[in-house]
Image (spheres, grey):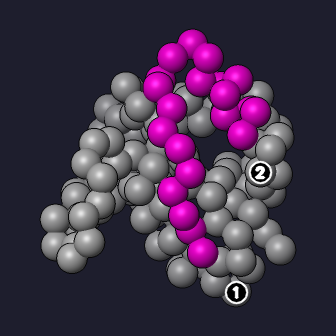
Amino acid sequence: MSVYLAVDYGTKRVGLAIARAGLAEPLVILDNSPELLNQIQQIIEAEQPQQLIVGLSEQKMAELTKAFARELAAKTKLPIIFADETLSSQTVREKIKTSKKKVRTGHIDHFSAAYFLQEWLDTHQSTAR
């Protein structure tokens, strides 16, 4: 069974999501701090993903994300695939607003990571599972 770890990189927070058996779920939100790469490495050791899926947005944030992904790849030695995460946070916020169940308020970075990871999995079904 393939395991994938999604990373929603942000300048303040980084959301992580995990997928096993083709289903993505939010994992954790980490502060973007000097310890970030070490924290992600610890999660990788615990979860054992075969691949990292890094959300890529647009413009300046895309460049910052690519630079972070290079550091992450060097640290983890795992292959990285970029997935379009444009509007994932906005889509998640809308889903939370229209949900009948009350979802906790606060940061949604890990939900955004799960959202674009699930989209990636659905697009790459035959090769991702």
* Label 1 Cα neighbours within 10 Å, binned few <14 / some 14-19 / many ≥20: few
CA–CA distance in space, label 2 to label 1: 22 Å
Is 109 in front, or is 61?
109
Residue 63: assigned label: none
Left or right of 7? Residue 37 is right
Q: Nearer the viewer, residue 67 or 99?
A: 99
Answer with left or right where residue 106 lies relative to residue 129.
Answer: left
Residue 107 is covered by the magenta coloring? no
On the image, the x and y values in percent for residue 32 come to 47, 23
Looking at the image, which is closer to me, 102 or 80? 102
Residue 83 can be seen, yes or no: no
Q: Residue at x 65, y 53 (%)?
A: 5
Q: Which residue is mark 1?
A: 126
Q: Secondary structure at mark 1?
A: helix
As drawn, 2 above or below 55: below
Residue 31 within the magenta-colored segment of the rendering = yes
View extreme (top): residue: 34
Which image quarter is the N terminus in?
bottom right
Q: Mark 2 or mark 1: which comes first in sequence?
A: 2
Which numbered disc covers residue 47? Answer: 2
Furthest-front residue in this view = 102
